[in-house]
Image: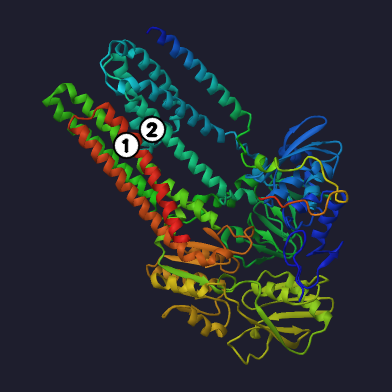
Amino acid sequence: MNNPDCFHCGTKCGSDPIVFEDKPFCCNGCKTVFEILNQNELNVYYDLESAPGTIPNEIAGKFDYLANPDIAKKLLEFEDEETAVVNFYIPTIHCSSCIWVLENLHKLNKGVQTTLVNFPKKEVRITFKKNEISLQQLAELITSIGYEPYISLESADADETRVDRKLIYQVAIAGFAFGNIMMLSFPEYFQVDEFWLNRFKPFFRGIMLAMAIPAVVYSGRDYLISAFKGLKHGILNIDVPISLGILVLFVRSTYEVMTGTGQGYFDSLTGLIFFLLLGKVFQQKTYSFLSFERDYKSYFPIAVTQIDKNKTQHSISVNDVKKGDRLLIRNEEIIPVDGILLNGDALIDYSFVTGESLPLSKISGDKLYAGGKQKGPAIEMEAIETVKQSYLTQLWSKDIFGQQNKDNIKTLTDSISKQFTFIILGIALAAGIFWYFQDRSIAFQVVSAILIVACPCALALSAPFSLGNMIRIFGKESFYLKDAYVIESLSRADTLVFDKTGTITANNASEINYLGTPLSKTEMMAIKAVLKSSNHPLSRALYEYIPVKAEHEAAGFTEHLGEGISGQVQDMKIALGSAQFTGAVNQNPNQTQIHVKINGELKGMYLVSNNYRKGLNRVMDTLGKEYELSVLTGDSEGEKENLESILPEGSQIFFRQKPEDKLNRVKAFQESEKSVMMLGDGLNDAGALVQSDVGIAISENINVFSPACDGILDARSFSKLPSFLKLSKKTMSIIKISFVISFLYNIVGLLFAVTGNLSPIVAAILMPVSSISVVLFATVATNFVAKKILY
Amino acid sequence: MNIIFMLIAASLVIAILFFILFVKSVKSGQYDDVYTPSVRMLFEDELVKQKNSEPDNNQKSVN
């Protein structure tokens, strides 16, 4: 069977490609984009990369709300009588061809003046002439070539990137001060008693003080402010010891310089601030590169259709929705505010909120919550809240939606730092009292030396650096985590639960055979039309398999999770699903069968043999040695033997699990004190994913996911799963080792300080050295173990 | 050796001048995106018309 790749987007065209100018396309959309680019002589698009395009989405009516000048004003960065500038976020930008075609947008429409792409951020800034092309037309234009902009409340309200640069300035000032102060300290380091050097000492020291002031006041302010705020609430967070160190260093050094008793510790002070900030920059770059974490606000649409008293429809901004407004919500649109359903067949999908993908059907009078997606014909509802007060805006804040991370590294670090401060203050007090009676002159030196040298800065750096680097490494291997602390949960898991369909079986390339009365072409087209609306992996596989083109729409489509699907095409009532669902006789309960019933008559069935992922056996073998494995599936016992041969002895396999059953199984494991990691495809196991300690969604297409998971694993990297788990454990060991290293430094330093032997040189050396070495160790160690385990 | 006062002062002035230039360049936004310009410079300025050019002299550029 000829199955060419689409010339535009690269996906398989199936058995019936659309051919245009001798090139195959998977759909009309791709062909249209090719036509547009061809007519405007932009074919270089295809020369830069092969199959660089993305399938364009439906445009009709989608951007009508941009015609509303209030909404447009919110989105435009700049506007005057003639020109306007808008910044669109386009998630489908992924290669150099994308940059090329978007920057050549002016060739498609004269109204576009210039376009500038920001590839890492996936943004495009377009300057256009308002009178020649409107914002709405612009959005429609770029959607038509496959680059649909992602417009949300977020982008309209925010004022983000100005803050980003502050960190760069802080690092610059701290680095400038650090470098210059170190240079100016050179004469002092050598402690040579030379006439000229002594004459200029006050001058050099004065300059050092002058440079240190902006470093402390501007660059170090975040730590000082955070510590102060913490203390105001009676909390000793990790910034308290750091700020204490900074302040003590600064005060003592200023005192020494002013009274001429010493050179102070300005080099250590500015070095400390510089390295702390450098750590922050490294973290930021790592996180922004992976940007998985989306603010859930960005799922809200920005405009909604309101119906006024005269039954006319207006497009209004979400923020203008008042209590009592009547709103129209169409298929696939998100409900923007809490409200009451007035009329229509409401089938609301709350997977964004609860992770439960089974849509709930509501009747007139039922309450609808914001964040749900309507799946079905348009419905009307009355708003009972305004957007800001909506229950879900609160629910979606990360603290509540993500389960409490019990006992993670952050809490460990915070508790250590609390005790640390107490201990240090205690030691300083004790030593101070001791030396006060022994030899008063060095009492002050000892006390301040203790406070200076005892810095848990290494503590603060080791966890973020190790975790940050590991997240970056994981990301390179197509394993994307929500945040760094997921690594810790991964290292603690002892039970692995796998969903079957779509997780350990591959979605496509299943072997399918048909048994029964042969189906006519019309019948097959009808079946395909019904399959089109279903997201279930079996439906998708069957859809690919049937060798006809689907025409006509299926009316009354319903999906009965775990059972089957049904719909009506023209005059045929189609039902597809398990034997139970269609009323067929199941002679062989050990097979996965999709029975076909047309107009009440059983025609036959499709036999689906599972196609397990490559390397599954090895993955299970390796994992079986250290973890308890389990498989949950909605299928019948058909695959029992196969699964038992793949899984190690004693693994539990559960069949015929509905989504609630899966959730309950996970709960049962957790109740017997197990830490559960669940792997699913995010469709019918979303609830279980949320419930488990770590929920990973296996994805064949990274753009499709449920916010309920803690991480996404690209299906192609599935065989690396044991390595990922091993690496998480090693990362935690690395963090513990670097804790130990930083403790060692502190102990050595304290020994010197308490015995009154801490000279400026030793303190100056110890502090930056301890920070640098911990950071280096964390980075090098994580890179090293990653290389060893992954390659 | 009193000249050292002037030397230090002069070097400080130059250092601060560079610092100001650095701040200005960051403000101008050129460091906000350091990846795209590396791709952009590989594009051709003039579109080569398909019919006139030699067949297959367009190499696929490395992403």
Callout 1 and callout 2 share a chain:
yes
Whether residue A236 appears in this view of the structure is no
Position of A143 with respect to B49 (left or right) is: left
Task: Indicate the amino acid at tag 2.
Answer: Leu
Residue identifier under label 2? A272
> Which x, y percent locates residue A111?
84, 39
Whether residue A741 appears in this view of the structure is yes
Q: Residue at x 56, y 68 (%)?
A: A685
Q: Secondary structure under badge 2?
A: helix
Q: Residue at x 61, y 72 (%)?
A: A506
Q: Which mark is residue A455?
A: 1
Position of A374 with respect to A640 (left or right) is: right
Image height of A44 relative to A623, above or below: above
Q: Nearer the viewer, residue A165 or A11?
A: A11
Q: Chain of mark 1?
A: A
Q: Quadrant of the N terminus of chain A?
A: bottom right
Image height of A541 relative to A431, above or below: below
Q: Chain of mark 2?
A: A
> Which x, y percent locates residue A467?
44, 50
> Which x, y percent locates residue B13?
50, 15
Residue contact at pointers 1 and 2, CB within 8 angstroms:
yes
Question: Local crowd at mark 2 within 10 Å, few (<14), some, or many (≥20)?
Answer: many
Q: Residue at x 33, y 31 (%)?
A: A245
Q: Secondary structure under badge 1?
A: loop
Q: Nearer the viewer, residue A142 or A97?
A: A97
